[in-house]
Image (cartoon, rainbow, N blue to C red):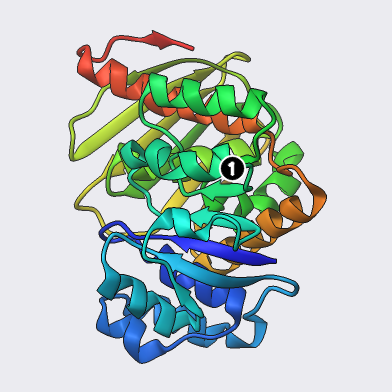
Amino acid sequence: MNIGIIGMSPGNAHPYSWASIINGYFDPEEISRVGYPAVAAYLQANQDTLGIPGARVTHVWSQDREISESIAGAASIGHVAENLEDMIGKVDAVILARDDPENHKQMAAPFIEAGIPIFIDKPLAYSTNDLLWFAEQHAKGKFIMSCSSMRYANECRIARQELKSFGKLELVTAVGKKDWKKYGVHLLEAVFGILDDPEPASVRHVGALDREIVLLRLRDGLEVTFHLFTHISGTFQVSLFGQQGWKLVDIRNSYSMFRDNIIEFVRSVEEGKPRLAFAKTENIMKIIIGAKESMENGGREVFL
């Protein structure tokens, strides 16, 4: 399976890390030189499991030729495309590895229209119009897969396995660094992965831009609170509080969740359709967009 990778956006090392995980090769010096020593470190620590059987990133494109050549050299990618459309007819699937959702529709459209399976980095969309367009393409039978890798985090899988032992859940809290627009999806995927994708009822944004607090109410009455603060330290965490027990889920193993996510995409392409239902991604995007609308309207409750 020949895969094309499209990158990159500032601060997002996925073109380097994901291509390295698939191809089984990485240049730690180059990855560190461009500002991602932590990526080089986790690839080094897991080099014995690098490489996805039956798949290879063969083409790369970014908005800057120098960046494209850096990614290609760092992950042993054979072809640097001059234009992203040049990949059409040469790859079997595409990974859009940018996390700026306002650009996703424009960059994904040529591949979706050409019928090429695509994985789109989180979040899929940040406007209702863009989300509707992706939903329409999905309804036409186009192959679109998108999520945060936290859906596949081992720590969350263990919590899901133990969930029944906590009894009836009364409260779920989730805490992370950075902003709601790009990182709220991480916490949502973690929580929804653990809870088996419950149905949301309403959402409110009651924080500020650098101290974002989002209140989510589920149809079954469970309250979930999300806290994304720009200047705190720490990892992504989810706390589950039930009537008979509780658990803190401390999510740290980025490499494992990335690799499992990539494997799910490759398996999906092999099987001819996404193994992650589009409706689950759509639900989470509605929450992200709803919280943005709530913030823009003074914290008004938005019903989903």
Q: Which of 126 and 200 is in front in this view?
A: 126
Query: Eyeballing the image, is 234 above or below 139?
Result: below
Residue 187 visible in rendering: no
Residue drawn at x 24%, y 53% is 232
Q: What element carries label 1?
A: loop
Residue drawn at x 30%, y 56% is 9
Residue 265 visible in rendering: yes
Q: In this view, does 272 lie to the left or right of 183?
A: right
Q: Is residue 29 left or right of residue 92?
A: left
Q: Nearer the viewer, residue 250 or 44?
A: 44
Q: Quadrant of the N terminus?
A: bottom right
Query: Eyeballing the image, is 300 above or below 57?
Result: above
Query: Where is residue 138 drawn, in percent x and y?
Result: 63, 29
Q: State which quadrant residue 166 falls in.
A: top right
Residue drawn at x 26%, y 75% is 66
Residue designated by label 1: 114
Q: In this view, does 195 lie to the left or right of 122?
A: right
